[in-house]
Image: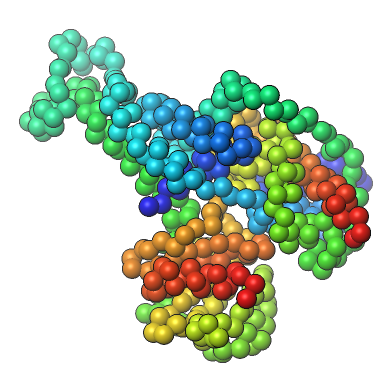
Amino acid sequence: MVLPHLDAAYNFARYLTRNPDDAADVMQEASIRAFRFFGGFKGGSVRTWLLTIVRNTAYTWMANHRRGTVVTPVEDYGIERPLEPFAAVPWERLPDDPETRLLLAEDRAALMDVIDRLAPEFREVLVLREIEELSYREIAEVTSVPVGTVMSRLARARRQVQENWRRHVALEGGGR
Amino acid sequence: MSCADNCLLVDLALDDELDAVGLAEFERHLKECPDCAVAYARQKALRGALRAQMPRHRAPSALVQRIRAALPETAEVLPAPAEPPVAEPQAAEPRPIELRPAQSWHAVPAWAALVTGARLKMAISALGGALAAAVATVWLMHVTPEERMTHAVVESHVRALMSGRLLDVVSADPKTIRPWFTGRLDVSPPVKDLSAHGFELIGARLDYVDNRRAAALVYRHNEHVITLYIFSTPSAPTYDSDAVVRQGYAVCHWSRHGLTDWVVSDMDPDQLEQFEDLITGSV
């Protein structure tokens, strides 16, 4: 049996809570809410509607169940700083550059760590765009912010991932 | 000229959020501005990397079972949703309709010629159970991009078999097949010789599935034909999946190094997963 929306919903909850147990709890609660509020469903994409419920549930849930875990401080790596250009060679042919390493990385844990360190408002737009492939308008709907905000958050999220990944590579791959 | 303002344009272009005019302008700008060209190339690389590498968590089956088990119970506890207000002009007559769901099923057709829209709605809202079932159906059965792709690859596979246009290039040699795609696709698909494992490479064709070009590699295993579709970036969100069976064909898909593979065959799902292991594994 394929339960595609449950996968999408769970995946989103997992990224929001950063923890499988919490994600399962959020999902269970979100599914109950989804059925209760189905009357509020105004048509459109069921997936978007469901993701909205998952998001609201997750934030409420996290606010009520802080488990003393330290919330990773939001580090701003400075979007204003221009990105230093690197050689105008297609990236495929640069075996040692960080994006290529990211592409080839077997080390998903490190990538997960980089994404987990994003502030929630950046992490959620990134997941909705890159995994769920929602449009800006749909992301705006799920996260209840204007499209312009989605746009700038997404840009910042990407630049932060890029910066943080470069740091990770620099720290971990000193010999490279 | 500093192109800080164009930073967002790079993202917009990447996300298909520019209209045709905007896109044309952006492309013209890229030719003149090396900074933006580099930024765009890097963002594109990052996007490919993220899509290939970000974990896609599947809902654990225990959780799915718990949620499904909770559904009927939930439906009973809840009041019928979307109770319409009785105060609509046509429904001036205030007499409440007290029908149990089982009765209203029979009652509705008999009234159909007489009742106003508002009354009909009330009768329908009495069918709380049926509505909850419909909700569950929408939840579980709504067609997702993944389902659409599954359908598209099965269709493509069957069409190729029926039309006799199964192969554009006939060869058992990966060294012949891979270069054949040069200039025809934006990826150079990895081609594996699996004859040692009983999967015989017979050739390849260029195919067009779900509005995208794909490399279709064709293998044979005993009397079964297997098509392996290789796409560059995924257009649909996908989760690495177990094999599913559609119209008698087993289908599964996965991603590797920025490519998305879909495979379809009339083999058993188990055999198909064995094929998947051979393709993805370090064999």
Seen in the image, is A171 located left or right of residue A146?
right
Above or below for B20 versus A32: below
Seen in the image, is B161 located left or right of residue A120?
left
Seen in the image, is B21 located left or right of residue A82?
left
Give me the residue at 54% from left, 54% from top.
B238
Point out residue B176 in the picture as x, y percentages from the top left corner: 64, 88
Q: In the figure, residue B186 lies in which quadrant? A: bottom right
The one nearer the camera, B23 or B219, is B219
The one nearer the camera, B166 or B172, is B172
Q: Quadrant of the C terminus of chain A?
A: bottom right
Give me the residue at 65% from left, 81% from top.
B178
Above or below for B184 versus B24: below
Point out residue B11 in the picture as x, y percentages from the top left corner: 72, 46
Give me the residue at 58% from left, 20% from top.
A64
Give me the residue at 59% from left, 66% from top.
B231
Point out residue A175 in the picture as x, y percentages from the top left corner: 92, 59
Q: How was the colour assigned to the protein in this rendering?
A: rainbow
**Picture mark count:** 0
Point out residue B17 in the picture as x, y percentages from the top left corner: 64, 46
Q: Can residue A83 be seen in this view?
A: yes
The one nearer the camera, B61 or B206, is B61
Q: Can residue A148 be seen in this view?
A: no
The one nearer the camera, B101 or A174, is A174
Above or below for B235 versus A29: below
